[in-house]
Image (spheres, grey):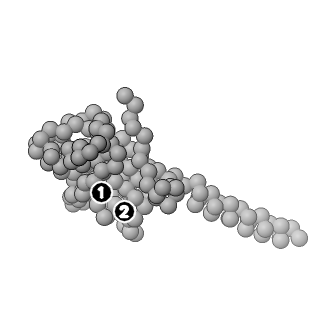
Amino acid sequence: MSEHRNLSLAVWLAFALAWCAAGCAPSVDQKTLATSIEIAAKPTTITFPGPIRPSLPWSEILLETNLAPSGSANPLSVAVTAGLEVTLVERSGLEMPLQLSFANQYVEASAPALQWPSNEPPTLVSLRLRATRPIRFERVLWWSYDPSKEKAGARLPERASR
């Protein structure tokens, strides 16, 4: 009887740990890489305090503007007009140019290697930003999350307090 009870307890404990691992795992990984930064023709390099690896299914760099999208003026159009280039640098020195898009007040910079990472996601050590015309950002964020845990399938961080 005691053996059966111990086995039942072990099965229950294994189930509880697996359930918690699936449900208790963080659904967002946010790191502030820089605040109040102006990008110009001379490349700006942001070296990460430690290597970053995509750990959740969707990862990107978010560049927060103080622009509220309206009509044809949106963060992406401003970034494109400024000639913004965003490049991640891997530990190996390999450079990963990022594609730009926008959501709300953010310029989103991402690459296929950051989405649903495979067995060996890249190890990232720095971010290089350059623009042909000066452009200012309130914050530069590493943003990683799991869309399957979001009701709308997408999520953005809260705007920085001013």
| Rendering coords of residue 87 (x, y %) | 22, 53
Q: Quadrant of the C terminus?
A: top left
Q: What residue type is labelled 2?
A: Gln
Q: Which amino acid does label 1 sit on?
A: Ser
Looking at the image, residue 19 sits to the left or right of residue 91; the answer is right
Which residue is nearer to you in this view: 19 or 76? 76
| Residue 54, above or below 39 | below
| Residue at mark 2 | 115
Q: Residue at the front extreme?
A: 71
Which residue is nearer to you in this view: 80 or 134? 80
Under circle 1, the secondary element is strand
Tell me which residue sits at (31%, 64%) in the image.
113
* Between discs 2 and 1, the one toward the N terminus: 1
Q: How crowded is mark 2: few (under 14 residues within 10 Å), some or many (20 or more)?
A: some
Looking at the image, residue 2 sits to the left or right of residue 77; the answer is right
| Rendering coords of residue 17 (x, y %) | 65, 60
Q: Residue at the top extreme?
A: 162
Q: How many marks?
A: 2
**Residue 98, picture quadrant:** bottom left
| Rendering coords of residue 104 (x, y %) | 35, 45
| Rendering coords of residue 85 (x, y %) | 18, 51
| Residue at mark 1 | 110
The answer to whether mark 2 and mark 1 are in CB contact below 8 A is yes
Which residue is nearer to you in this view: 103 or 135? 103
Tell me which residue sits at (22%, 36%) in the image.
136
**Residue 58, picture quadrant:** bottom left
Looking at the image, residue 19 sits to the left or right of residue 4; the answer is left
Looking at the image, residue 145 sits to the left or right of residue 129; the answer is right
Tell me which residue sits at (89%, 70%) in the image.
1
Q: Residue at the right extreme?
A: 1
Q: Is residue 61 visible?
A: no
Under circle 2, the secondary element is loop
